[in-house]
């Protein structure tokens, strides 16, 4: 059976996924790539396919307990991902099924932890960081502050769900995009739908 990434649970537009794949293919030539917020693995597959072109490594950071909007009673709650025994959201089983079906187990390194915990003592240089974790201000800025320092010059910072108009979506991802740009360390690359891309220059 041919694997179809569009059938994986998730909220990534195919055009955004293809852009991530292209970025990962470029970036993985020089260093590892990392994503924050894997959910069920849709973005992981696109990024993993890009890394595979260079036999690269993709670190996939997610606590797999769901973001705020994935909890019971919230807008994006999915009963299929709710562990009735533990009474918590658990997307890790679905994530592992996705990575196995996509034949990416040999290059995806799952890190089941919060972004902050995963980043403690992190020393590996990164050529691409994709942020699509929690969308609260605290969560988004934690992701930015934890991982941006590890991006090499020439590497990419990609942020999902960029909505300049507050009427269209939450502002936390856009706010960290603006903060990264204001730091003077990044230049703007082309945006693909709601996927903002910055390139580190300093």
Image (spheres, helix red, strand yellow):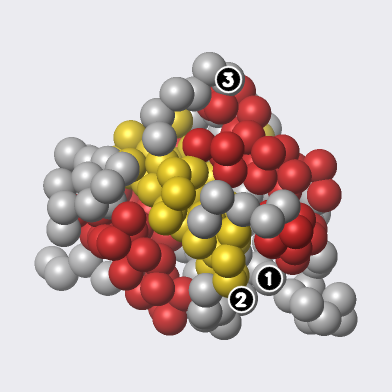
Which badge, 3 or 1, comes first in the chain's sequence?
A: 3
Quarter assignment of residue 181:
bottom right
Badge 2: residue crowd in 10 Å (few <14, some 14–19, many ≥20): some
Residue 163 located left or right of residue 48: right
Outermost residue, right side: 167
Provide the residue designation for mark 1: 162
Provide the residue designation for mark 3: 120
Spot occupied by residue 48 in the image (x, y as percentages of width and height): 29, 54
Spot occupied by residue 92 in the image (x, y as percentages of width and height): 46, 39
Residue 101 located left or right of residue 148: left
Tell which of 183 and 160 is nearer to you.
183
Query: 116 above or below 181?
Result: above
Which badge, 1 or 2, comes first in the chain's sequence?
A: 1
Provide the residue designation for mark 2: 194
For the residues marked 3 and 1, what is the alpha-carbon distance in whole angstroms? 27 Å
Please state the total of marks drawn on the protein image.
3
**Residue 73 showing in the rendered view:** yes
- Determine contact: label 1, label 2, CB under 8 Å: yes
For the residues marked 3 and 2, what is the alpha-carbon distance in whole angstroms? 29 Å
- Determine contact: label 3, label 2, CB under 8 Å: no
């Amino acid at each position: 059976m041919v694997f179809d990434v569009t059938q994986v649970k998730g909220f990534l537009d195919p055009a955004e996924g293809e852009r991530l794949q292209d970025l990962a293919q470029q970036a993985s030539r020089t260093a590892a790539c990392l994503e924050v917020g894997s959910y069920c693995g849709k973005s992981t597959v696109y990024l993993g396919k890009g890394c595979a072109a260079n036999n690269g490594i993709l670190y996939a950071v997610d606590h797999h307990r769901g973001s705020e909007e994935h909890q019971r009673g919230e807008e994006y709650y999915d009963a299929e991902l709710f562990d009735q025994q533990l009474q918590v959201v658990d997307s890790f089983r679905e994530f592992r099924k996705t990575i196995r079906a996509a034949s990416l187990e040999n290059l995806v390194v799952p890190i089941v932890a919060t972004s902050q915990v995963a980043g403690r003592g992190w020393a590996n240089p990164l050529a691409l960081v994709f942020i699509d974790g929690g969308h609260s201000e605290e969560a988004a800025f934690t992701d930015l502050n934890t991982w941006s320092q590890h991006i090499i010059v020439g590497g990419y910072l990609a942020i999902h769900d960029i909505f300049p108009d507050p009427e269209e979506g939450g502002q936390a991802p856009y706010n960290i995009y603006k903060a990264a740009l204001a730091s003077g360390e990044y230049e703007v690359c082309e945006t693909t739908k709601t996927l903002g891309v910055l390139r580190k220059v300093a």
